Amino acid sequence: MTVAAILKHKGHEVVSIRPETTIFDLVQLLAKRRIGAVPVLDAEGHLCGILSERDVVQALAEHGAGVLQRQASQLMTASPQTGTTHTTVPEAMAMMTEGRFRHLPVMEDGKLIGMISIGDVVKARITQQETEVDSLKAYVVSAA
């Protein structure tokens, strides 16, 4: 199973922000949309970073409430790891586990076409394993 299959079921909608978006506005957006991270896109729509709730919490702990007036570009992870529609579910899971991040932007031809979360990856992996178990059960029953 690939990231393309996840996006087929999840959809390609991506909520994004601009580098000049304030952290206060970012927090409002994350809460309103009930999401954990957003890609940061420049004026031409190119991915220049990603900003997560974890990034905000860490900055608040280190610098206090004044962080809310900063811009996204000051806190974002620049040049984040990305996947493609051809990235397999195990590859995505490995990237996220090794990199210790929970959201993976999906790129195609240099454009952001989706975003998957670790929850999406785990759900896909469970579905894949359930399908394999069902196939094995069917095989055993037909062989008996």
Image: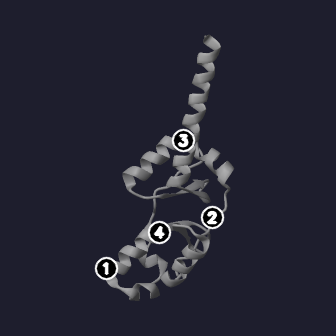
Of callouts 3 and 2, the N-terminal one: 2
- According to the image, label 3 marks what residue? 126
Are dots 3 and 2 in contact, CB under 8 Å?
Answer: no
- According to the image, label 1 marks what residue? 62
- Find the distance from the CA under tag 3 to the CA under tag 2: 24 Å
Callout 4 secondary element: strand
Residue at 58%, 55% in the rendered image: 107
Callout 1 secondary element: helix
Callout 2 secondary element: loop
Callout 3 secondary element: helix
Residue 19 is left or right of residue 113, and the answer is left
Q: How many C-alpha atoms fall within 10 Å of the one at disc 4: few (<14), some, or many (≥20)? A: many
Location of residue 128 with respect to 97 vertically, above or below: above
Location of residue 141 with respect to 60 vertically, above or below: above
Of callouts 2 and 4, the N-terminal one: 2
Q: Nearer the viewer, mark 2 or mark 1?
A: 1
**Amino acid type at mark 1:** Glu
Q: Nearer the viewer, mark 3 or mark 1?
A: 3
- According to the image, label 2 marks what residue? 14
